Amino acid sequence: MITEFEVIADGVVRAYAKGGMIAQVNNPKTLAHVMEVYGLADETKIKGGNGLPFNDKIIDEAIGIYNWQVNGVA
């Protein structure tokens, strides 16, 4: 299960499960696919790389796609 997302650059997100990186993506459809394959933990952290402010738009869009594909809700 995915336990953490890290936004490392503008439009680049890493996903982690059990302490290890499982994916580095740059678009919401790919991230949604990773979410579907690995699943989401009940609590998933989101952080910015290097302590910088970040835009988590890709994560928001990916969750919307994931919810539609997996749960049938928008």
Image: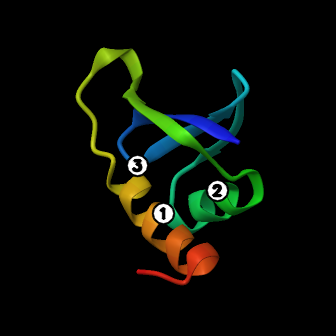
Q: Residue furthest left?
A: 53
Residue type at mark 2 is: Met
Tag count: 3
In the picture, measured across the screen, residue 47 lies left or right of residue 29, that is left
Expressed as whole percent of the image width and height from the top left, the position of residue 40 reads 61, 49
Expressed as whole percent of the image width and height from the top left, the position of residue 63 reads 47, 62
Using the rendered view, name the quadrant where residue 46 is placed. Answer: top left
Residue type at mark 3 is: Gly
Please say if the residues under marks 3 and 2 sit with CB atoms less than 8 Å apart.
Answer: no
Please, is residue 4 above or below residue 20 in the view?
below
Residue bearing mark 1: 62
Asked which secondary structure carries label 1, the reply is helix
Which is nearer the N-term, disc 3 or disc 1?
Answer: 3
Residue type at mark 1 is: Ala
Residue bearing mark 3: 11
Query: CA gap, disc 3 to disc 2?
Result: 17 Å
Residue bearing mark 2: 35
Using the rendered view, name the quadrant where residue 41 is placed. Answer: top right
Asked which secondary structure carries label 3, the reply is loop
Please say if the residues under marks 1 and 2 sit with CB atoms less than 8 Å apart.
Answer: yes
Q: Which residue lies furthest to the top in this view?
A: 50
